[in-house]
Image: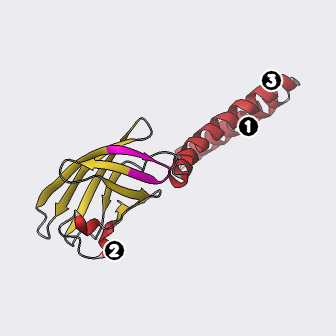
Amino acid sequence: MRAGTRILAALGVVVVSAAGLVACSDDSGSSAKKSTTTTAAATTTTTAAAATTSGAATTTAGAAGPVAGTYTNAGANDPHYSMVVQTSNGTGIGGTMTFVFQDGTTQQTFTFSGTASGGSANVTPSTGSAITFTYTSNQLTFANCSAYLQYATQASQCTFTLQ
């Protein structure tokens, strides 16, 4: 117990000493130094926050392509389509559409490449005609997907959600 008390007391001295050093460094009297320190800290925080916000805002506003990742149109335990989206250079997109059967086996439907901007994407699949879909920060919506997705028999299956 005494050893534990000594450690806690030593930690208290270190914390109090560190607080004293911080207090002393703030009393330097140099407003330029204070301003630089404050600005650097604010810039670092703002930059990190802006990068995160910027990515979400850009995707939501539709200025760039959809978020890269895997999108599905049903739950994991149901037969569903899975679409892997990859992005490049802000507006270039590509990927693979796969059907996942109930037993977990998969069948590649097609690969695709194209461009995306302003909340809309135009892609050319490896089989069939060009496809257009809209996107938000976490969803892709295909119009009349049953025309090229054999197992999509309901309109709700044309909406894919980022996983």
Query: Residue extending furthest bottom?
Result: 154
User: Is 9 inside the magenta-drawn segment?
Assistant: no
Dominant SS of magenta comes to: strand
Label 3: which residue?
Answer: 33
Q: Secondary structure at mark 1?
A: helix
Colour mapping: secondary structure
- Upstream in sequence: badge 2 or badge 3: 3
- Is 120 magenta? The answer is yes
Q: What's drawn in magenta, residue-wise?
A: 114-121
111 or 129: nearer the viewer: 129
- Work out whether mark 1 precedes mark 2 in sequence or the reverse, and give the earlier one: 1
At label 1, which amino acid type do we have? Ala
In the figure, residue 143 lies in which quadrant?
Answer: bottom left
Distance between the alpha carbons at the discs numbered 3 and 1: 19 Å
Marks 2,3: beta carbons within 8 A: no
Do tag 1 and tag 2 residues touch (Cβ < 8 Å)?
Answer: no
Q: Which residue is mark 1?
A: 19
